[in-house]
Amino acid sequence: MRALVISGGGSKGAFGGGVAQYLMEELGHSYDLFIGTSTGSLLISHLALGKIEKIKEAYTSVNQSAIFSNCPFVTKKDKWGQEQININHWSVVRNFLRGAKTFGESQNLRELIGRLLTEEEFEELKQSHKDIVVTVSNLSLHETEYKSIKEVTYEDFCDWIWISCNYIPFMSLVKKDGCEYADGGFGSMVPIKEAVDRGATEIDVIILETEVTYYNSLPSKNVFSLLTNLHSFMIDRIEKQNITIGKFAANNKDAIINLYYTPIVLTTNSLVFNKEKMADWWKRGFKYAASKNRELNEIRD
């Protein structure tokens, strides 16, 4: 059984989409199992449907307002041309006055998910042999949970995709089934082990970080940039742990893992959704996958 695993990574999901497009359209890879975390969960349903152009259009035309119903920060470029975030004080105060537990809200993303994935498409996937699995973090039970399309309703599945993407405290904290849930990346950034546990024998893994650690965070200018840097540090540790555990699980089951990292640091803040950059990242992902496979073929020859 072949599986495709796509990690979290916010706006960098555009790069992952380009890699997946090459693997499916140029190499002809057909997957029985799709597992995504955060932005990866947004990609996998349409990849499983074979509707790559549809999800590509969404990723290369999205902006901040398509994600945030109440955006907690504003962005501006510093003297080096890098995008730096500053607190949107009025939006944050307004959110707290409403009784929210987070700085911002992402209801617009939930609406976007409902528009992108129709109920007919959901039923088509549910009736197929393919399994689509979304990673979420249950904060109440301190557990990572995996939600299969085979086990839920349409509305619930859209909710789980949305929840998997909610990078708190900047996005919505969701209460569902009596528990508080957040971004799947807080528990499993790269769910390789879950793919192995579900029976995958060959796994293509798209990791939306560089393989080698680079200096990829700008100095903290305010509490928001400090929080994003802190979150990035924690997520990076989780990601490396997931990969190590995944490799160990695969070795024990004689499963093959093919890893696709981003070759360069794409952005220092993956919560900034710039459609021009994301369109470029999709193209880069496609070209990178092509280049990597050419190199592999040359080594084999």
Image (cartoon, rainbow, N blue to C red):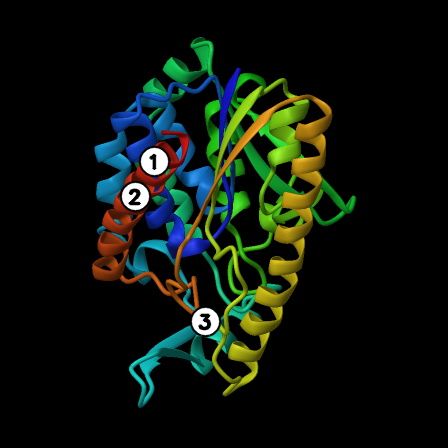
Classify residue 278 by image quadrant: bottom left
Pointer 2 or 1: first along the chain: 2
Percent across and percent down for residue 226 are 57, 79
The residue singled out by tag 3 in the image is 72
Q: Position of residue 258 (x, y in %)?
A: 49, 34
Residue under pointer 2: 291
Assess whether mark 3 and mark 1 are in contact (beta carbons under 8 angstroms). no
Question: Which residue is located at x 35 percent, y 40 percent?
Answer: 295
Q: Residue at x 71, y 31 (%)?
A: 249
Indicate whether 106 appears above or below 44.
below
Tell me which numbered mark, 1 or 3, is placed earlier along the sequence: 3
| Residue for point 69% across, 29% down | 251
CA separation, marks 2 and 1?
A: 11 Å
Label 1 vs label 3: CA separation? Answer: 48 Å
Left or right, residue 20 beside residue 221:
left
- Image location (x, y in percent) of residue 238: 66, 53
- Left or right for 130, reference 253: left
The kind of residue tagged 1 is Glu
Kind of residue at disc 3: Pro
- Mark 1 vs mark 3, foreground winner is 1
Asked if residue 97 can be seen in this view, the reply is no
Disc number placed over residue 298 in the picture, else none: 1
**Disc 1 on helix, strand or loop?**
helix
Q: Nearer the viewer, residue 114 or 279?
A: 279
